[in-house]
Amino acid sequence: MKPVRILFVCLGNICRSPLAEGIMRQLTRRNGYGDVVSVDSAGMGAWHIGHPPDRRSIAVARAHGIDISGLRGRQIDAADLAAFDLILGMDRRNVAELRRLASPETFHKVHLFMNVAAGRNDDVPDPYYETADAFEALYQMLEAGCSSLLAKLKRPS
Ligand code: 4NP
């Protein structure tokens, strides 16, 4: 597999994208791709810069054997568009904002996560105002998407 740098992006970088980062990192390591696939996450907004992930994302990750408590929120900047190969927005609003940040050279890197992962034009819904139950559903959606994404990256293109 060609080395690939993946950036997961959501609104706050405390619920969805850090969980996706933790899941993808564990999947790639477990499958022997830890050295070729690098993962990171960022938010569109600045509210949670320096903050740990939402405790509900930390808890659901921990329940599935993944520790994301050491991650810290950050805001995407223009340099990220150049530095990463795949910039995956969790929902269509993230993708629209990412496309506004992108240049003609980097525009092709921006995709909707579930679309590039599983060929489905589905948003990963914002769980911030939801109950803890929504975070298990979030985990399942992200895990399925990350597994599909890894399988796709493994296929020679
Ligand atoms: P995320 O969820 O985009 O999945 O991290 C959110 C977290 C915080 C806010 C919105 C969404 N917020 O408005 O602070």
Image (tube, helix red, strand yellow):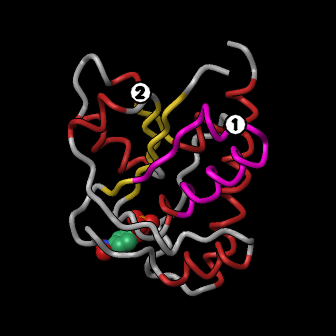
Residue 79, how many percent across, how many down? 23, 36
Q: Quadrant of residue 82?
A: top left
| In this view, 40 is above or below 65 | above
| In this view, 11 is above or below 4 | below
Few, some or many residues within 10 Å of mark 1 (<14, 14–19, 20+): some
Residue 87, how many percent across, how many down? 42, 37
Residue type beneath disc 1: Tyr
Residue bearing the label numbered 1: 33
Instruction: Name the residue at the top extreme.
Output: 157
Residue 127, how many percent across, how many down? 50, 73
Residue type beneath disc 2: Lys
Of the numbered discs in the image, which one, if any, rests on residue 109?
Answer: 2
Residue drawn where x is 38% and y is 63% of the image: 13
Q: Label 1 vs label 2: CA separation?
A: 21 Å
Residue drawn where x is 64% and y is 72% of the image: 61
Q: Quadrant of residue 26?
A: bottom right
- Highlighted magenta segment, given as a residue range: 19-41
Indicate the quadrant containing the N terminus: top left, top right, bottom left or bottom right: top right
